[in-house]
Image (cartoon, coloured by chain):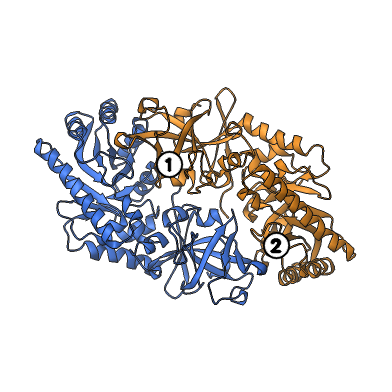
Chain colours: A blue, B orange
Amino acid sequence: MQFSEITTPALILDRSRLQSNIDHLTDILAPHSLQLRPHLKTCKSLDVANLILDPGTGGITVSTLHEAEYFLSGGYTDILYAVSIVPQKLQQVKNLQEKGAKITLLLDNLKTAQDVSKEGMALDTVFPCLVEIDCDGKRAGLTPDAPELISIARSLHEQAGTHFEGLMSHSGGTYSCDSTEAIQEMAEAERKAVVQAGNRIKSEGLPCSTLSIGSTPAAYFSNNFDGITELRAGVYVFQDMVMEALQVCESSDISISVLATVISHKKDKNRVLIDAGSLALSADPGKKNNLGNTHFGLVCALEDSKPYSNLWITSTNQEHGLISLDHTSLSFEDFPIGSQIRILPNHACITAAAYPGYHVIEEGGEISAYWERCNGW
Amino acid sequence: MQFSEITTPALILDRSRLQSNIDHLTDILAPHSLQLRPHLKTCKSLDVANLILDPGTGGITVSTLHEAEYFLSGGYTDILYAVSIVPQKLQQVKNLQEKGAKITLLLDNLKTAQDVSKEGMALDTVFPCLVEIDCDGKRAGLTPDAPELISIARSLHEQAGTHFEGLMSHSGGTYSCDSTEAIQEMAEAERKAVVQAGNRIKSEGLPCSTLSIGSTPAAYFSNNFDGITELRAGVYVFQDMVMEALQVCESSDISISVLATVISHKKDKNRVLIDAGSLALSADPGKKNNLGNTHFGLVCALEDSKPYSNLWITSTNQEHGLISLDHTSLSFEDFPIGSQIRILPNHACITAAAYPGYHVIEEGGEISAYWERCNGW
């Protein structure tokens, strides 16, 4: 199969870049004793997961119970559902347990902890739980010094329907950092927050076997994982323009791209139009580019996915992408109507979710496979 | 079925608001002689389309050939594919013709016009075409005075593989207007642009039977459709927070909402968290709210979809929505963990695309149906 046979817009996955990204994080973590628990919310693909780890040899992270069910069907049984649980979803969790899964749940308040324990007893099961620690003020969780932390851990430990496993934090704040030093500082702050909270719990005589941290930027720039038992990262398998802006990767590391067709030349505006718009690329404005502008992806050549200098998706409509030729040495002749280009997306997790799967390309440019994704809820 | 039985996040469609929005545009257009050709890229649903018009009684607009195929399967044969065509997609168009469709195509340059004619001859068919007119500089199309316009129209008219039907413009610039007067002016500018371009073509002795304009804001605020034969509008069936910001509608007109569950209370940040994030709501930042802030939707009560004052989705992660209680008189007790809320989205077309279908609710709150959507390409 060739690019020209694919209906555009479509999602392309470069297998060698993917493998290289997977290997790179393995190398980063090799000197350390912590486990990688990959976050599969980005890829939502068993084919990608199987490149990271063999089912049965390690745990995974998911962002929806739909993903949990999907990856369980592929043999992954040790699953962390890393979004705060609510009691209403526990019957679904119990159903997955009955199919052989160990689903570890996340929560951050005493009332929920008690309700999950009660429901565990009512359903004649035990729900393993982590407590979420807030390391950067960006999302959920308890600060490491929160008084409630001990009572939650104790409740989960002592009540029959739950098992307290430890702590989890997410350093999403690294996405807002403006230097690798700032990312490194935030990663260290995350480590300290989780270790400190864990020590508080252990000093109360409670077990706390899991100390889980994560975000791709933190994974790449942290140089200290002391005391941490596992790391979660997701977007590293694909990388994207946000990661490139954070210097986590080069644009040549980005394994995912949107294949699009040139559909119009707007000559009086020096603008090329393509058939990939806000549905195909996502409406995520990402980070500003080198021109200081918001954009919706970096335009690359079809065959080698090499970016054109200063060629950005400057704006989008639902099914239109607009590309300004200003600030480039390119002309309309470089992009004949009907020709194809590829776009490196701002945020791989969001862009990929628009597609049912990936067209996988090999190093020589051959399209060798189609890998499905599990979208939705 | 009740809200509590629905797995969240999910898409809710209020049937009475939907019907009221459909009726309202019918009323607006009733005094005028132009036809409504609804743009079904927003709803992507036969059930919604069937409330607007009976198959066979009028034309529709689509943004993908996938939509064209879907609506054709429901009996809609007169279909305008309102995105610039490329020759590579013509075999697919021919396949739809063979299934009984009249697919009208759009283009804006001579080379494509000639290529489409050639391909029409090669495929032993005739492709009806419109030429896109640029009325606001925002997307594609020729300006009304462009010299190329006449040669394109003549080529489409004279070549055997095509039929020149007329002109089409899209006043997407109305989305950037800051007053209803500005929208009205832009709508009138659009009308004039298309009529002027049509007159140029007719003065050359060429037929030009279709003069098609459109955008929901223009449809609502224009008071002059002289010379225009048809109007396209799409988002009006649902409305959204962008339309509300443009004063096209009130928030109480918005027929679509995202159902979500409260999953955490972040008390030290005065923040409620829900299980609807950037995948469930879209990453589209829309327009700033009354507090001057970017947001990702307005939070409403579950049962009556009545908005809370100043209660916005202040930020999102992939599967987390964060709601600040600042600037409100609300407290955590108003949003118990496990309770449900609804969110009026920024951009209905984009948010809806994350879901395979709609849970339809009746005026009394009963969930009466599930209507599927045709997403993707």
Chain of the residue that carries numbered disc 2 in the rendered image: B
Amino acid type of the residue tagged 2 in the rendering: Gly
Amino acid type of the residue tagged 1 in the rendering: Thr
Residue A25 left/right relative to B322: left
- How far from the left and from the top, in percent, is residue B283? 47, 49
- How far from the left and from the top, in percent, is residue B244? 59, 39
Residue B277 left/right relative to B70: left
CA gap between label 2 and label 1 equals 37 Å
Q: Residues within 10 Å of mark 1 (few under 14, many from 20)?
A: some
**Looking at the image, is mark 2 or mark 1 earlier in the sequence?**
2
Q: Quadrant of the C terminus of chain B?
A: bottom right
Secondary structure beneath dot 2 equals: loop
For this rendering, which residue is in front, B203 or A220?
B203
The residue under the point 44% across, 76% down is A364
Chain of the residue that carries numbered disc 1 in the rendered image: B
Tell me the quarter of the picture where residue A273 sits.
bottom right
**Comparing labels 2 and 1, the label whose residue is closer to the camera:** 1
Residue marked by disc 2 = B141
The residue under the point 22% across, 61% down is A29
The residue under the point 16% across, 29% down is A158
- How far from the left and from the top, in percent, is residue A366? 47, 72
Image vertical order of residue B175 relative to residue B140, above or below? above
Give the number of callouts.
2
Image vertical order of residue A265 relative to residue A158, above or below? below
Residue marked by disc 1 = B314
